[in-house]
Each structure stands twice: as C-alpha cells, then as structure tokens.
C-alpha cells in the first residue's frame, strides 16, 4: 500500500487492492494446505483430539478462553494503530514523523522533554523543521454570556505550523516571538471554536477572549479541517527554558518533524540515534537507557511504534 500511495494511487484504490490480494493469498494457502499430504492430518487424529477435549472439559474451557481473549488483546494495539493510518489533510503527510524515546530497560516509550527537543533541533539535518506540543488538555473558554465551556487544546512551538504547512484562514499562526517568556498572551483558535463560541465574528483578530481565566488576544483562525495533533481546537505558545529542565526531566512533549526532500525515515532515525548517542555519553544517568525512534505521524501521536505496538507487552503463543 505504501509503495502504491507513493506512486500517486488513491488511498481507496490502494486499500481495495490490498484487501483483494490478501483474500486471494489466504484462499490459495488454504486450498494448498487442504490438499497437501505433508500435513499428516488424518481422521483418527481429529477423533482423538475431540475425545480429549470432551474428557477434559476444564482444560478445554481454559484453553478456549485463553485463545478467545488473549489473541484479541495481543492484536488490539496493532489494529488500533492501523485504524488511525488515514492520512491527515496536511501537505506531504508521508513526510510528517514523530520523534520518540524507547526505554530499553522498561520496554516502554517515554515522551521527550523540552531538553531533548532543544538538543535535537539544531544538529538534525534530515528534517526540514522540528516542533513540539504538550499533551492535549482541556481549557475553559469564557463566552460572551459569562459561561465557560471546556475546549481541547495544546501548547505548541511556532514551528509546528511550518511543519504541517497549513495556512490560517484568518490572521496569522504563532511566531517565535510568541514563545518568549513575558511576551503578550496570544492564541490561535480552530474553526469550530470560532463559529460556536465567537459566532464566526469576521473581526475576531485582535479580540481578547479568556482562556483558563487568562485574557488572550486571538491572532489567527485555522481552517475547519485543522485539528492538529488530535482533535485540538486552540493553540497556545509553548513557553519554557531548557535550562530549567534537569537533563530532560521536565514536561513531557510530543516532538514532530518534517523530513527533508529525498530523505527516508531510516536515514533520519540513524541521524537521530547518532545525536542520542552523544547525549547518552554526556548524560548516562538519564539517557543511556534510551533508544530513539522515528515513527509516522498517524501512529506516533497515539504512542505506537512503527510496528503498530505501544510500550506494553503482547501475547506470546507457542
């Protein structure tokens, strides 16, 4: 599917061809296996197996329950990851990646910190740009009638908008000056928030709204399809200093990057791991146990790896 999408074949057609090929392959294997004498399965084996199942009902029940529950649980992360593989409406979505840490001691993924983001941002040449966001949070937005309503949003670096390459519908996106501590409090809002809470006011740019009890100036409105990274409707500037983080122990972030032209994710991951190796040598107590990975956007935002698995373990069948 990835190769066909890279050649410009529509997503629905690639999925249809994938399904047809998968069904045909499964049918061919089934027919071959049914006819092959090498399997060594006889009717006597089948009767003996059924007789053992009847004589040991307790063991049969445990085995059936383990298979019925264990296999779906083991496959659930992979299927959940694939469910989110629909390409987002951003420019060149195949080039959008998530940079993440994998703890080899605990076999779990760890969110990068502001310290990690700053250390990665300059030396990585395989990415056009890197950006970071906090995990989605709920903010109370005060309406004209004085009632507050919860709205999903995130704190983001200004470079996030350069990575997704989606222009604002009105006004501007965040700029690097908005990230400076002490700069005016501003916000970029989504289309739905603009329509539902601000009545689609065409003069909304420059208008102040209270978010979490803090008055913030609206500097931009994003298009209706923009909900980056996951169903968010407002974006605040991410402010902080990497110097205040104790070697990466600060707030957890999601780090995004856009691959440079002609660069594969394997090349980007190799460069990221080289930078991570230098960090591990300098900070062995916090970074020696980390392995750095580059994961597609549609998987990385939900905490999955490139194989579709999260940090948790799976079910092993022997």
Image (tube, rainbow, N blue to C red):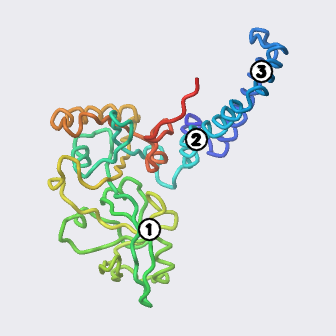
Q: In which quarter of the image is residue 228?
A: bottom left
The residue closer to the viewer here, 278 or 169, is 278
Separation of marks 2 and 3 at Cα, in angstroms: 27 Å
How crowded pointer 1 is (Cα within 10 Å; few <14, some 14-19, many 20+) is rated as: some
Q: Pointer 2 and pointer 3: residues touching (CB < 8 Å)? A: no
Query: Which sits earlier in the primary sequence, circle 1 or circle 3?
Result: 3
> Mark 1: which secondary structure?
strand
The residue closer to the viewer here, 261 or 214, is 214
Instruction: Report x, y in % for residue 9.
Output: 61, 41
Separation of marks 1 and 3 at Cα, in angstroms: 56 Å
Quadrant of the image containing the N terminus: top right
Q: In which quarter of the image is residue 187?
A: bottom left
- Residue linked to disc 3: 49
- Residue linked to disc 1: 152
> Mark 2: which secondary structure?
helix
Separation of marks 2 and 1 at Cα, in angstroms: 29 Å
Instruction: Report x, y in % for residue 31.
Output: 80, 21
Q: Pointer 1 and pointer 3: residues touching (CB < 8 Å)? A: no
Q: In which quarter of the image is residue 77?
A: top right
Instruction: Report x, y in % for residue 315.
Output: 54, 33
Q: Specify the label residue 250 is tagged with.
A: none
Give the residue at x 74% y 12%: 39
Q: Nearer the viewer, mark 1 or mark 3?
A: 3
Left or right, residue 160 beside residue 6: left
- Residue linked to disc 2: 73
Quadrant of the image containing the C terminus: top right
Query: Which sits earlier in the primary sequence, circle 2 or circle 1?
Result: 2
Image position of 76 with respect to 245: above or below: above
Give the residue at x 78% y 14%: 41
């Amino acid at each position: 599917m990835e190769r066909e999408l890279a050649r410009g074949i529509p997503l629905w057609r690639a999925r249809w061809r994938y399904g047809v090929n998968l069904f045909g392959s499964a049918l061919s294997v089934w027919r071959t296996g049914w006819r092959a004498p090498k399997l060594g399965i006889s009717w006597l084996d089948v009767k003996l197996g059924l007789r053992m199942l009847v004589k040991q009902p307790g063991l049969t029940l445990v085995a059936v329950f383990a298979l019925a529950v264990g296999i779906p649980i083991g496959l659930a992360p992979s299927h959940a990851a694939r469910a989110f593989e629909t390409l987002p409406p951003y420019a060149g979505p195949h080039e959008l990646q998530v940079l993440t840490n994998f703890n080899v001691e605990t076999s779990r993924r760890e969110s990068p910190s502001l310290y990690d983001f700053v250390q990665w941002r300059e030396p990585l040449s395989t990415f056009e740009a890197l950006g970071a966001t906090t995990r989605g949070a709920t903010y109370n937005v005060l309406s004209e009638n004085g009632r507050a309503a919860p709205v999903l949003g995130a704190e983001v670096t200004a470079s996030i908008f350069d990575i997704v390459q989606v222009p604002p519908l009105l006004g501007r996106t965040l700029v690097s000056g908005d990230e400076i501590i002490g700069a005016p409090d501003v916000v970029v809002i989504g289309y739905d928030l603009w329509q539902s809470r601000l009545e689609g006011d065409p003069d909304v740019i420059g208008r102040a709204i209270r978010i979490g009890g803090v008055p913030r100036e609206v500097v931009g409105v994003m298009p209706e399809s923009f909900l980056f990274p996951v169903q968010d409707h407002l974006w605040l500037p991410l402010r902080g200093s990497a110097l205040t983080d104790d070697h990466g122990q600060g707030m957890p972030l999601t780090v995004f990057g856009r691959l440079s032209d002609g660069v594969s994710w394997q090349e980007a991951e190799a460069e990221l791991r080289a930078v991570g190796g230098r960090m591990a040598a300098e900070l062995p107590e916090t970074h020696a146990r980390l392995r750095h990975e580059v994961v597609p956007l549609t998987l990385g935002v939900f905490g999955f790896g490139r194989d579709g698995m999260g940090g948790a373990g799976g079910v092993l069948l022997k």
